[in-house]
Amino acid sequence: MKREFLRAKIHGATVTEANVEYVGSLTLDRDLMDEAGLYPFERIEVYNITSGHRFATYLIEGRRGGGQVCVNGAAAHLARPGDSVIMAAYCQLEESEIEPFTPRLVFVDEDNRPVTLDELREGAGRPTLP
């Protein structure tokens, strides 16, 4: 039996653009994709912390280093520039794969650059964690 688990997430990213006219998807800074182990055209779930909206889409590779998080197409009605979002990808694991598995968790600052949990706890531009 397979079970579904969080494989990777980018937590607290700030939406930089919303483009209703684009044909769909979410354009993401390639550096963030690499940090989380995400690939172009991979399905992700997006959880809008600001509005509470949730939606599924796929990734398009954005330029490196700019912190780009652009919600495209119809989903652009569910996220606006400045909104805080979580992007998550899931995988299915066999029972034997569960114990050794560790998801990739990426936390970002106000410029969508990766930060450590310790930096978040110290208030690196985001709400602090316990």
Image: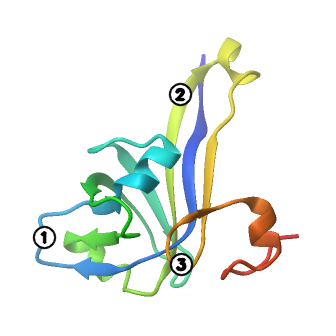
Instruction: State the separation of the CA atoms marked 3 and 1.
Output: 23 Å
| Quarter location, residue 102 | top right
What amino acid type should be assigned to the residue bearing mark 3? Gly
Give percent across and percent down for residue 109.
Answer: 60, 73
Q: Secondary structure under badge 1?
A: loop
Whole-percent x and y of residue 41? 26, 44
Q: Which mark is residue 92?
A: 2
Q: Quadrant of residue 27 in the image?
A: bottom left
Question: Which is closer to the viewer, label 3 or label 1?
Answer: 1
Residue at the spot 70% in from the left edge and 23% down from the top edge: 98
**Mark 1 or 2, closer to the camera:** 1
Query: Residue sitting at 27 percent across and 80 percent down?
Result: 18
Q: Secondary structure at mark 2?
A: strand
**Residue at which label 3 appears:** 52
Q: Are marks 1 and 2 in contact (CB under 8 Å)?
A: no
> Which mark sits nearer the N-terminus, 1 or 2?
1
**C-alpha distance separating marks 3 and 2:** 26 Å
Residue type at mark 2: give it: Gln
Say which amino acid is labelled 1.
Answer: Tyr
Residue at 25% x, 54% y: name it: 60
Quarter holding the C terminus is bottom right
| Residue 103 rendering spot, x and y as whole percentages | 64, 39
Numbered-mark total: 3
Residue plotted at (44% across, 45% down): 34
- In three-dimensional space, the C-alpha distance between marks 1 and 2, rounded to whole angstroms, equals 31 Å
Which of disc 2 and disc 3 is earlier in sequence?
Answer: 3
